Image (cartoon, rainbow, N blue to C red):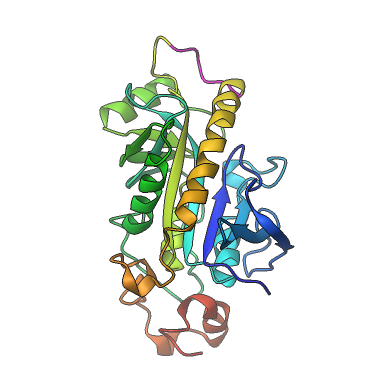
């Protein structure tokens, strides 16, 4: 099966990589069911890359229906070490305008009904999640976006992840602003948590589509508004991806982040107490720490 070290999870409006050549589509089976869609493997700027549309082609899956565990597992099984998420978000700040890009560095969880961990059935894992986005990958994305002269990109910020699929109430939107949140979306979690549990470097290109509903001078958020602004942003996200492809190090042992060793001190269950079938199930993720 073909391999890639860089994976891209495309959000609303990004269902395929325009710049990808030599494309081969692969269907991956996982212990957690099928991913959102087939995964396209090919070359972007001369670098092998795997692309997965988060909502499926044709946008068939709502945020709560996305098979996130299957998506992250599938990318890991292809050899992916770096995962770049492209996500549509609303702005909670006046200076972060629609059609801007933002590379967040923090998350606030407001989801309600999503599975947040791979591990179950006799295996307990407590990963550090103080820094939810990989600082190395985030910096590379920021540098690549800043190379685009016609794009405004913001460094850092807190992404509040809501359940969806409905947009915020005005009360919710104003509370998030008072709490100091910067952008709001529906898909960063549990994606970032599962990427950490799979020891993947994970970061997000947040594409600002609207001012949520707090901005009195703006019309209420509509799908039409989101899609129009997102379409304008997708080209910039694709250009950022082309630029970052050549910046990502081939050897993760040479970078400062700890993403590649997230499980080193996180597995709390005594290996002797883990059922053999559970060890086998999670072999892809835990093999270097716990023998089968």
**Picture layout, residue 194 above or below residue 79:** above
Identify the residue at image location x=40%, y=73%. 251
Identify the residue at image location x=32%, y=47%. 105
**Picture layout, residue 201 above or below residue 150:** below
Q: Horizontal placement of 245 versus 132: left or right?
A: right
Residue 218 or residue 121, whichever sits in front: 218
Place residue 7 in its image quadrant: bottom right
**Picture layout, residue 85 above or below residue 95:** below
Q: Is residue 24 visible?
A: yes
Residue 149 or residue 39, whichever sits in front: 149
Residue 235 or residue 220, whichever sits in front: 235
Residue 124 or residue 62, whichever sits in front: 62
Stretch in magenta: 218-223
Identify the residue at image location x=45%, y=39%. 206
Q: Position of residue 207 (x, y in %)?
A: 47, 35
Identify the residue at image location x=49%, y=75%. 285
Q: Main secondary structure of the magenta part?
A: loop
Q: Is residue 164 visible?
A: no
Q: Position of residue 99 (x, y in %)?
A: 47, 27
Q: Position of residue 161 (x, y in %)?
A: 43, 41
């Amino acid at each position: 099966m073909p391999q890639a070290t860089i994976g891209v999870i495309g959000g609303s409006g990004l269902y395929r990589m325009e710049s990808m050549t030599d494309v081969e589509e692969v269907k991956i089976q996982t212990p957690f069911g099928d991913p959102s869609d087939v995964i396209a493997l090919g070359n972007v700027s001369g670098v092998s890359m795997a692309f997965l549309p988060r909502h499926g082609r044709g946008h068939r899956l709502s945020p709560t229906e996305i098979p996130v565990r299957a998506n992250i597992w599938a990318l890991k099984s292809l050899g992916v070490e770096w995962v770049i998420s492209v996500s549509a978000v609303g702005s909670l700040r006046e200076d972060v305008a629609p059609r801007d890009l933002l590379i967040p560095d923090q998350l606030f969880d407001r989801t309600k009904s999503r599975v947040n961990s791979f591990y179950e059935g006799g295996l307990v894992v407590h990963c550090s999640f103080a820094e939810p986005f990989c600082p190395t990958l985030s910096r590379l994305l920021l540098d690549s976006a800043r190379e685009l002269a016609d794009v405004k990109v913001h460094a850092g910020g807190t992404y509040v992840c809501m359940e969806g699929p409905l947009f915020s109430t005005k009360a919710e939107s104003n509370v998030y602003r008072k709490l100091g949140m910067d952008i709001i979306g529906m898909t960063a979690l549990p994606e970032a948590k599962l990427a950490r549990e799979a020891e993947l470097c994970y970061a997000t290109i947040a594409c600002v589509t609207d001012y949520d509903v707090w901005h009195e001078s703006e019309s209420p958020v509509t799908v039409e508004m989101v899609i129009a602004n997102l379409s304008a942003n997708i080209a910039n996200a694709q250009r950022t991806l082309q630029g970052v492809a050549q910046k990502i190090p081939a050897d993760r042992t040479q970078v400062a982040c700890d993403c590649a060793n997230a499980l080193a001190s996180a597995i709390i269950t005594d290996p002797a107490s883990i059922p053999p079938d559970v060890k086998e199930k999670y072999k892809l993720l835990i093999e270097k720490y716990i023998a089968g």
